[in-house]
Image (cartoon, rainbow, N blue to C red):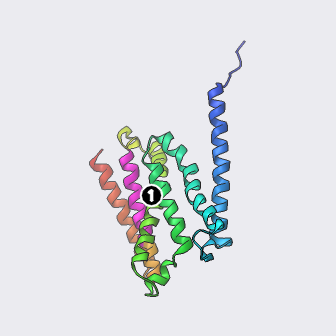
Amino acid sequence: MNEPITVPESMTLDRRLLWALGITSGIAWAAWIYFLFIFEVGSIPNPWDPWRIVFYVLLLLAPTLTFAPIAFRLRWYFLLPYAVIGWAAFGFLLAFLPPPLAVLTQQQSPLAVWYYFLDLFVVLTTILAPLAHIAGLRFLSSRTHRRDFVRAWREAGLLAFYLVGLAIARNLGLITWPIVLLGLLFLVLVEALFLARKA
């Protein structure tokens, strides 16, 4: 007779920990979104108001709970501080600074818009780099390319740069379908050249 397969206790604990982190992270992000878009914490003038302090904590807590498991799983230890700082700054900018359109139309200092789009680039790369790594493991045949974290971050950076460029063009009213398609084609060609050079 075949003996029943037993799951090691350590794996069970790891799964429980991941579930707990996932649920806690989801709650933290839900509260993050609530304070930002529904409660409108940015309308509170006092920077030391208790509700603003709660929001400050959420700015750090939500990305920490989200990206800590990813950083340790992929052994990208730099990802954790990079993501926490990027997402916390992005939430702060969304809550307490004017939207980019107001800046681009000369209603506010233009320096703020560069902070906004730079931080948008950072948060996009924190999402796209792990996704590019997973896509490479699944679809690329070359072992060198599959395990190359530089490739994942290069692809994330290129795509984030493309999306930020589209966001800037949209705010300036310059975006058209030919620009979108040509930019995407250029992005694909650049990455294809990188992959072909290291093949």
> In which quarter of the view is residue 186 placed?
bottom left
Relative image position of residue 83 (x, y in whole percent): 48, 55
Task: Work out whether 103 lies above or below 127.
Answer: below
User: Which of these two is toward me, 75 or 34?
Assistant: 34
Q: How many marks?
A: 1
Q: Residue furthest left?
A: 197
Q: Residue at x 42, y 44 (%)?
A: 140
User: Relative to residue 73, is residue 52 drawn left or right?
Assistant: right
Q: Residue at x 66, y 31 (%)?
A: 12
Q: Residue at x 67, y 66 (%)?
A: 34
Relative image position of residue 124 (x, y in whole percent): 47, 61
Q: Secondary structure at mark 1?
A: helix
The residue carrying pointer 1 sits among few (fewer than 14), some (14 to 19) or many (20 or more) residues within 10 Å by Cα, namely many
Mark 1, residue position: 125
Report if residue 128 is visible in the image. no
User: Relative to residue 188, is residue 86 drawn left or right?
Assistant: right
> In which quarter of the view is residue 21 placed?
top right
| 157 in magenta | yes
Task: Work out whether 63 lies above or below 181.
Answer: above
Relative image position of residue 37 (x, y in whole percent): 64, 71
Q: Which residues are magenta?
A: 149-165
> In which quarter of the view is residue 36 placed?
bottom right
Q: Residue at x 62, y 28 (%)?
A: 10
Q: Main secondary structure of the magenta part?
A: helix
User: Which of these two is toward me, 104 or 64?
Assistant: 64
| 96 in magenta | no
Report if residue 7 is visible in the image. yes
In which quadrant is the C terminus drawn? top left
Relative image position of residue 81 (x, y in whole percent): 46, 51
